[in-house]
Amino acid sequence: MPQPHVIEASNLHLTFETNDGPVNALSDVNLTVKKGDFVSFIGPSGCGKTTLLRVLADLDKPTSGEVTVNGVSPRDARMARAYGYVFQAAGLYPWRNISSNIKLPLEIMGYSKSEQNSRVSKVLELVELTGFEKKFPWQLSGGMQQRASIARALAFDADILLMDEPFGALDEIVRDHLNEQLLKLWKSTNKTICFVTHSIPEAVYLSTKIVVMSPRPGRIIDVIESDLPSDRPLDIRDTKKFIELSQRVREGLRAGHSDE
Amino acid sequence: MSENSKVFPVISVLTIIVILWYGFSVVLNAPWAYDQAKRNSISLSFPELVSKTWSQKRPKLPTPHQVANEMWNTTVHQKITSKRSLVYHTWITFSETMFGFFLGTSLGILLAIAIVHNRATAISVMPWIITSQTIPILALAPMIVVALGSAGFSGLLPIAIISMYLSFFPVVVGMVKGLKSPERLELDQMKTWSASGSQVLVKLRLPKSMPYFFTSLKLGMAAALVGAIVGELPSGGGGGLGFRMLSGSTFGNTLHIWSGLFSAAVLAASLIIFIGILQKIILKKMALEL
């Protein structure tokens, strides 16, 4: 029996009605994601990569087409707390310390106090923030805040992690470090991750599958299955294979632009 | 700006006000002084005129030191249970203000929550809330007193209701804005956790509205005090600073009017400073400075 797909989208269309007329955010998107995949969505701004992620999370509704998450509608998946979502900004509450920020979704979902505490220490260890429980968000650097926000998304142990340019606002050195950490975390937790980015090296470094998108209308240009080894030190980025993959992504992005 | 550089302008303005005040005391009280002098067939030199206008028993405009003296005498030298004590009247007005403020703030918060959560409420209630504030409270206050009086309520409650009527408005306006202050990202985040409306309210909207809440409280407190004083006027009898000022006006006792006025100002300032201190402490603790 074939493994069921975690995410399946077919003929997905989404049109936003704006004051300047309708905008085709997504056009004829077809996509399957297997359990344990690390999928990156890459493309210039306006290509619908964030919109696609928001559709999967039931934050936006498709105009037409079919989409399932864990075999059910995005809405049912959301109600079943099937995914953790990491936004561009950390979105930590300044009046809560790190520990109680991470507890926030757990409180909402009705976990017991002791369960909350054990989960907080577990996820803080995963993102290497142990010892920062009592610190407030403003006492942490941008990178640490984003790690805390990832910890919060992991806290309720959803199988799927949806990440919308989580490291977009961070400098390259911090970003490299967090990419390494994220890979480690992905391998140790066996989660399915959908990751939106506009950085080619980031997409190639992290993914098992790279989805290249193009704007006006937002659509998928190319889907690249990466055959990089699962063990990826940072210097894998200098290997021939990595550079070839990056070139293929770049070509896809260029093709998407040429027909404007 | 440093503390020192703030002191100078404040002192200068205060000095100018006091000088003008003494000047006007001379001008406004002079006719009576001349009249008295004429009856006694004496003529007044300028220094004599000044000293006479600054020490009349029933001046048109009492001087600052007369008002200060009156306030001192009616707070320190009277038993605080006496109707002649300013403390007694201030206490009555204070109780009415607090009662009205409590009712107004509660009503304001409840209305704001209803408005933020339900579009139908927003559309149907908001015009009435705004209309309510276009009716002069002076016209409305006697009606409230009479209506509640005929229903068997007298004393504190009718005045607190009038006070509430003025104080709920800034709270509604401020809290609607505050409860709507969470950003799109924060609301989306709550949605991804499939949080209920009441969870979003308690965990996000209410804490996030705190800076607006305290600003509303300050405005609401000032309005509640005005409401309490206005409410005392048609109620009669009971006491309070409004009653004191009204009786002063009826019997031409300007010292009562001015000392009542200043007591009201001191009361208002103290209450608002108190809220300001709470605001500073709590917002600092929440890292929510606006």
Image (cartoon, rainbow, N blue to C red):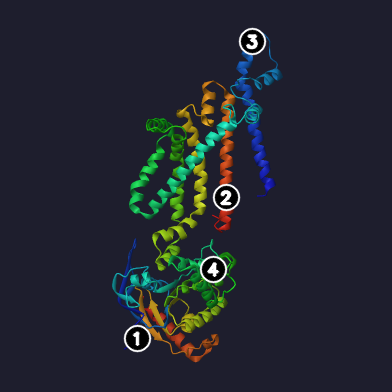
Out of A23 and B10, give the one closest to the viewer. B10
Circle 1 residues within 10 Å: few <14, some 14–19, many ≥20? few
For residue B38, which numbered disc appears in the image? Answer: 3
**Res. A99 mark:** 4
- Disc 3 and disc 1 on one polypeptide chain: no
Q: Residues within 10 Å of mark 2 (few under 14, many from 20)?
A: few
Q: Residues within 10 Å of mark 4 (few under 14, many from 20)?
A: many
Looking at the rendered structure, the kind of residue marked 1 is Gln
Q: Is A41 left, or right, of A66 in this rendering? A: right
Q: Position of residue A87 (x, y in %)?
A: 46, 70
Is residue B206 depicted above or below A159 in this figure? Answer: above
Q: CA distance from mark 4 to mark 1?
A: 37 Å
> Secondary structure beneath disc 4?
helix
Q: Amino acid at mark 3?
A: Lys
| Image mark 2: chain | B
Disc 2 residue type (three-letter): Leu
Name the mark nearer the viewer: 3 or 1.
1
Which of the labelled discs sits on residue A3, or is there none?
1
Q: Which mark is residue A54?
A: none
Judge depth for marks 4 and 1 and give the one in front.
Answer: 4
